[in-house]
Amino acid sequence: MRRKTLLKSIDPETSRNKFIKGNKNFIYLINKRLKWMKKYTESKQNVLEFGSSNCLSKLILGKKVICTDIKNNKFLDFNLDMNKLIVPKKYKKKYDVLIFNHCLHHSKNPIQVLENISKKMIKNNGFILINEPETSIIFKIILKIFNHEKYDDNIENSRFKNFWYENNSTGKLLFSKIKSNDVFLNKYKVVENELSEFFIFLNCSGNGVNTPHIPLNYLFLSIINCFDNILVKLMPNIFALNRRVVLKKL
């Protein structure tokens, strides 16, 4: 029997309120995960986010972002299952940018999702912007302690049912062996592939949940972020908690 998880389900309203009401730790993390996307979205019109939930991307990247998720809530533009890609008629167009912010590992098969998106949704030369958890040693320990989702680094097990679903190793399995300018799935050019985050993530106070943290101002958060960058660069297999990837449709 699966032991009880120590984390509650993520509540989109809780995370939005935390951002709007000024939790600096949380604001810093969300800005770190989304603000870099502006250089890919600011001159584009058709931008859609999968698994948006709290739709904070619209607050950071602008109102043009179409927020979707499989579960309905008042912040979304419409419901969309990345596994089926049934898009309402008025939104049925080729997109310039698609965003996956810590949601690709919730798909039944991320490779199939990215292949289907290439056929059905994204324009040639369009971008896919991805943040995914990175299953470093520290992150694996965190997942075991909190019993929150799972991970499996062994790609040989991908033949098993539900291997990919909630597999926090998705980013590592798909992208750890490819570099910038490599071609992925014969459909995309890899533009960026970088690791980041440690204390900034651990001390963020949680996304949609409230976890213990030390409140800090932006100066200290910036200093910690610099320290994180050093740790991740020197020992990525131990400390990295996030992988950032940009794909460009060929």
Image (cartoon, grey):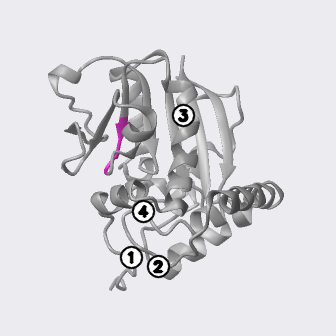
Q: Earlier in the sequence, mark 4 or mark 2?
A: 2
User: Is-magenta flag for residue 213?
Assistant: no
Marks 3 and 2, how far apart at CA: 30 Å
Disc 4 marks a residue whose amino acid type is Asn
Disc 3 marks a residue whose amino acid type is Met
Q: Residues within 10 Å of mark 1 (few under 14, many from 20)?
A: some
Q: Position of residue 87 (x, y in %)?
A: 21, 29
Marks 4 and 2, how far apart at CA: 14 Å
Taking the view exactly as shown, the residue that stands out farthest to the top is 124
Callout in the foreground (1, 4): 4
- The tag on residue 32 is none
To which residue does mark 2 refer?
A: 146
Q: Earlier in the sequence, mark 3 or mark 2?
A: 3
Q: Which residues are magenta?
A: 49-53
Marks 1 and 4, how far apart at CA: 11 Å
To which residue does mark 3 refer?
A: 37
SS for callout 4: loop
To which residue does mark 1 refer?
A: 7
Q: Quadrant of the C terminus?
A: top right
Q: Residues within 10 Å of mark 2 (few under 14, many from 20)?
A: few
Image label count: 4
Q: Nearer the viewer, residue 244 or 154?
A: 244
